[in-house]
Image (spheres, rainbow, N blue to C red):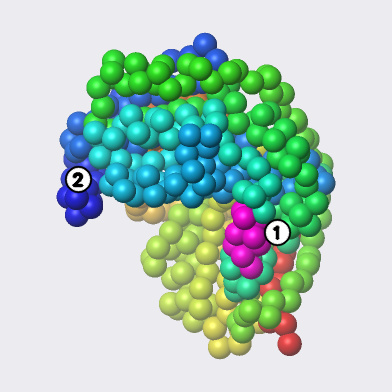
Amino acid sequence: MKYNFLIALSLSALCLRSTAQQVKFSEYDLDNGLHVILHQDKTAPVVAVSVMYHVGSKDEDPGRTGFAHFFEHLLFEGSENMKRGEFMKIVSSNGGQNNANTTQDRTFYYEVFPSNQLELGLWLESERMLHPKIDNAGVKTQNEVIKEEKRMRIDNKPYGKFAENIFAHLFEGHPYSWQPIGSMAHLDAARLEEFIAFFKKYYAPNNAVLTIAGDLDIEKTKGLVAKYFNEVPKGIPIVKGTFELKPVTKQIVDTVYDANIQIPAIFAAYRVPGMKSRDHKVLEMISSVLSGGGSSRLSTKMVDEKKTALQVSAFNYTLEDYGAYITLAMPNNNTPLDQLLTEIDAEVVRLQTDLITESEFKKLQNQFENGYVSANTKMIGLAENLSNGYIFHDKHTNNLNEQLAEAKSISREEIRDVAKKYLRKDQRVVLYYLPKK
């Protein structure tokens, strides 16, 4: 059964690759405010059921950080109609897969099933929304799980603390200044009533999108959605906080010592616009020019030709309100970190001064077209992208179908001008990441 299911997933990916230029979908709202998005694709007997809640670490009290990520775990504890620990067993025993993840801006839960188990997926997500088990036993269990996760992913992981140190400077005065995993001391101090209140406020249907993609019958699916979600009560309307940060006007330099590393690294990070801005897409293109593959500018210059770096990279970490454009390098042959930063800066200045070549531009457009198609080959990826369009683009779900045209409309001049506008030395954080002796 599992072998056949994996084959179906692969077939689904192959078939979608040739037809993914325009994604068809339907959408509507339930009376309780739950937004529903349906995408039909009958190329393989697979269906993805997902719920995205518009809640992340950005929505937390500064004295109670880590709540959104905590609920990513806690809402697998079971429900009034499901024994503790049964959620994942039910999924796997019916040929499915499931997971969840949390960012600063949203929490995303999903199951991927053979399509004859669609109703089961809807029941599971409705149980999570309507009848979750939130008690002291579950809180204690997940508290220990998250502490172990923090030890593995941050405390004991090489270079695991770079983001928290960069973001603390780059987003001072904004909830992005702390990481989604939050503070263990805050979670230890929190009372059960606080967890229940957080759930009631943010995990309501009017703060969520239910997206279903795959081998489904639209009318039958609408009936099942009504069956399992109509009874969920509407929550209190949520008013999102707004944060206007002062611009960074001079370079900020910091140093971190990490006992888990032997090779130092240097990071440079710039505060940039959030995902609603066209400029964030331009910055993604800049990342591709600088470090998108072995033939990119930074890799060619610093890894292949000069051999000053073991690794060099540039990427745009996009969030709802703002973003962080980050460059990093690890030295080869004891190259000084300052020299690595100088070499990266030289390539940035080159981008700010000269237009990229026509061949680079053509390669860039091909990369983005391939990336767009690849991002929508799997039903769960497609479901997430549709949800993102609704949540983060003013309820404009069709943003998914406009992304490729937007990328193709970006000019070489725009790439130069955006690099000049945001990637300036006087508005960045430089982080020296050194081995702890």
Left or right, residue 212 beside residue 332: left
Seen as rendered, the residue at the extreme top is 31
Magenta residues?
A: 141-151
Residue 167 drawn at (x, y percent): 71, 54
In which quadrant will I find the C terminus? bottom right
Q: Residue at x 79, y 60 (%)?
A: 252
The stretch drawn in magenta includes residue 11: no
Mark 2 Cα-neighbour bin, 10 Å: few <14, some 14–19, many ≥20 = some
For the residue marked with disc 1, what is the amino acid?
Glu
Q: Is 352 placed above or below 400 here?
A: below
Magenta residues: mostly which secondary structure?
helix
Q: Is residue 142 magenta?
A: yes
Label 2 SS:
helix
Please say whether residue 239 is visible from this viewpoint.
Answer: yes
Check disc 2 and give the amino acid type. Ala
Say which residue appears at 19% left-offset and 50% top-offset: 1
Q: Which residue is mark 2?
A: 8
Picture disc at residue 137: none
Left/right placement of residue 310 relative to residue 190 reads left
CA separation in Å, label 1 and label 2 = 40 Å
Q: Is residue 106 left or right of residue 88?
A: right
Q: Residue 328: which quarter of the image?
A: bottom right
Q: Nearer the viewer, residue 2 or 176?
A: 2
Name the residue located 80 percent from the left edge and 51 percent from the top edge.
Answer: 189
Tag 2 or tag 1, which sits nearer the N-term? Answer: 2
**Residue assigned mark 1:** 164
Q: Quadrant of residue 185?
A: bottom right
Q: Nearer the viewer, residue 107 or 130?
A: 130
